[in-house]
Amino acid sequence: MSLRTHIEQAWEADVLPSLMDFVAIPAVSVHFDPEWKANGHIDAAVTLIRDWCAQRDVAGLVVEVHELPGRTPVILVEAPAANGGPADDTVLLYGHLDKQPEMVGWREDLGPWKPVREGERLYGRGAADDGYAAFASLLAIEAAQRAGLPHGRCIVLIEGSEESGSTDLPAYLHALKDRIGSPSLVLCLDSECLTYDRIWITTSLRGMAAGTLRVDILREGVHSGSASGIVPSSFRIARRLLDRIEDPDTGVLRLPELHAEVPADRRRQAAELAADIDIAGHMPWVDGAGPVSDDRTQQQIARTWEPTLSVIGAEGMPPVASAGNVLRPYTSLQLSVRLPPTVDPQVAVEALERTLTADPPYGAHVTFTGTNAGPGWAAPALAPWLDAALTEASTEVFGQGYRALGEGGSIPFMGMLGELFPDAQFVITGALGPGGNAHGPNEFLHVPTAIRITECLALLLRAHATR
């Protein structure tokens, strides 16, 4: 049986049924579910993936679950070298099993924990981000062995806190450092593709700094007719504080600690991408709306190498339908700041806290708490063998060569691994493409792309073993 045939048949018969079961598990990340252990959903996802991996026909396969006290577990899978591959040269394949929360706005017949196969799409939270990674990684190893392709020692690491900034991962990287070894190649399936007709390789990822801005002005709410004009609105104070860090007209962030120089090669890459791809055209705009800038090159730079602020949550505000004429005592806003790849996230958090809490207007009580930060990542230059292998794999599987792009999201694991293994080569890719809507409603996995990426992984394992 050919490599492609085995992968296609296994996806239909083995992967998709289990992946649909995975979607049905509300394995929300620890940041969004502090009671994750009691609720049991993360553990259920771990059990499902562990059991599926353990059943694969891979020579010498070892599947383990590790759980440090108070931390979400990780799955570690080891497959020794096969078919003449180098036993002392390690490939690390990475994915995660925790998920973003439900989000509103799902199509009436869909839902976050309701797996629905619709043509080429598998709808539901976590299939594309990033539940398919474990299945694709193990299947790629299995298919390579069956086809007689050599591969080196493989370690598959599936973590449980990525959507919370990989807060638990550093402890495992330390605890398992001897098992992991020193990989010379890292394959990660947690990124996106701008089209479904080739492999897309991520060359950079933004970091993140987040926290909760809270403004208290009263001990309790009071009648707005009695108090307004005397008591300032906590929302207006919060708005003024946000203006300290962001220009409200342009969206440009004001703090120098949040900025970095954009490398010349990344600017060239952005221009090349802009000439072919209308990234803004992929967004689900309402009628008449449009991007911050009409310059497509600037759009790509802005989403990959410039800091941005998003207010992603709020408390202290009643629903519109039940809002009374009350001047509210406090406003609490959850802030998410995306950072350029080379910015120190801890320095960024400290700058945000210092700026937001200094000299509060009207003597209001202002705090910036619950902070978390994750590093960005800038890829090292591709080795000639890997550049050639990517071109060959993408051409053989998709019919045309690969493309590279900077990515606006975060995978904290990459920054951590880049520091631990500065000499490793990285392939950051994924099946999350146009309309896939990770973290939002109607998230879906494009199944044919996931199948093709699985085949590409097997070919990259061969290229690594024979370089």
Image (cartoon, grey):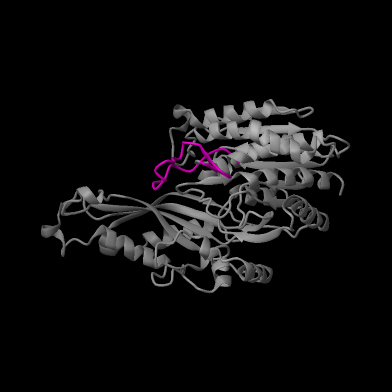
Query: Residue 455's quadrant in the figure?
Result: top right
Going by the picture, which residue comes out furthest to the bottom? 295
Q: Position of residue 25 (x, y in %)?
A: 49, 32
In this rendering, does residue 158 appear at all?
Answer: yes
Report x, y in % for residue 465: 84, 44
- Is the magenta region chiefly helix, strand or loop? loop
- Report if residue 119 lies within the magenta region: yes
Magenta residues (range): 96-123
Residue lying farthest left?
A: 226
Residue 432 lies, in percent from the top left, at 58, 50
Closer-to-camera residue (223/362): 223
Front one among 139 and 225: 139
Which residue is found at the position 60% from the left and 38% from the top? 159
Q: Quadrant of the N terminus?
A: top right
Q: Residue at x 46, y 53 (%)?
A: 210
Q: Is 407 situated left or right of 183 in this image?
A: left
* Relative side of 79 to 213, left or right: right
Q: Is residue 155 visible?
A: no
* Farthest-out residue, right: 84
Residue 250 image offset from top left, x and y in percent: 43, 72
Task: Judge by depth and name the residue closer to the eye, 301 or 349.
Answer: 301
- Location of residue 61 (image quadrant): top right
Quarter of the rendering containing residue 462: top right
